[in-house]
Image (cartoon, grey):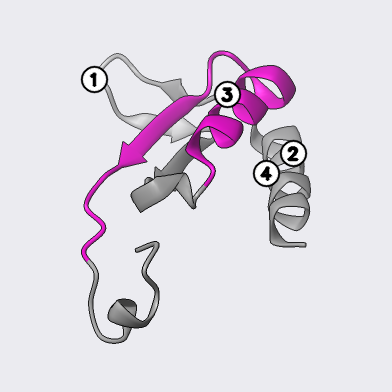
């Protein structure tokens, strides 16, 4: 039940720190920034993740979508990757 546990954790983190606050020099001072690794065949649930963040967290959440996944080691055992 990883997605639900993750969502609950993100909600709690946001409750504690709120939206990202950046100072006049562009330095993050406090708040939440979400990093999400996009995987092949949408197995990471990117669309659902973005929807969850915008609807249940904040439309002001900073979101870093990472696309640098590179299959390695035993990834060849998983055709979806």
Mark 2: few, some, or many residues within 10 Å (few <14, many ≥20)? some
- Work out which residue is located at the far bottom of the displayed protein and give it: 74
Closest to the camera, between mark 3 and mark 2, is 2
Point out the stretch of residues depicted in magenta. 45-70
Q: Are discs 4 and 2 less than 8 Å apart at CB? A: yes
Q: Which mark is residue 25?
A: 1
Residue drawn at 77 percent across, 51 percent down: 4
Say if mark 1 contacts mark 3, CB within 8 Å.
Answer: no
Q: In which quarter of the image is the N terminus?
A: bottom right
In this view, 66 is above or below 25:
below
Asked whether residue 39 appears in the rendered view, the answer is: no
Q: Earlier in the sequence, mark 4 or mark 3?
A: 4
Regarding mark 2 in the picture, which secondary structure is present there? helix
- Is any atom of residue 16 visible in this view? yes
User: Which residue position holds label 4?
Assistant: 10
**Dot in front, 1 or 3:** 3
Distance in Å between CA atoms under marks 4 and 2: 4 Å
Foreground label between 1 and 2: 2
Query: Residue tagged by mark 3?
Result: 19
Q: Is residue 8 above or below residue 62?
A: below
Q: Residue at 42% of width from left, 44% of height from top?
A: 35
Is 5 on the left-hand or right-hand side of 72?
right
- Relative to the observer, which residue lies in front, 39 or 65? 39
Q: Quadrant of residue 73?
A: bottom left
In terms of sequence position, does the residue under pointer 1 or pointer 3 come before the other? 3
What residue would you read off at disc 2?
Answer: 11
- Secondary structure of residue under mark 1: loop
Distance between the Cα atoms at labels 4 and 3? 12 Å
Q: Where is residue 46 in the image (x, y as percent from the top left)?
A: 49, 38
Tell me whether circle 1 and circle 2 mark residues in contact (CB < 8 Å).
no
How far apart are labels 3 and 2 at the CA level?
Answer: 12 Å
């Amino acid at each position: 039940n990883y997605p639900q546990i993750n969502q609950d954790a993100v909600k709690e983190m946001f409750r504690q720190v709120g939206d990202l606050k950046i100072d006049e020099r562009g330095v993050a001072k406090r708040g939440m920034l979400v990093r999400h690794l996009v995987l092949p065949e949408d197995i990471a649930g990117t669309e659902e993740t973005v929807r969850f963040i915008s609807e249940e967290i904040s439309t002001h959440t900073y979101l870093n979508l990472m696309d640098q996944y590179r299959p390695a080691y035993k990834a060849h055992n998983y055709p979806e990757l």
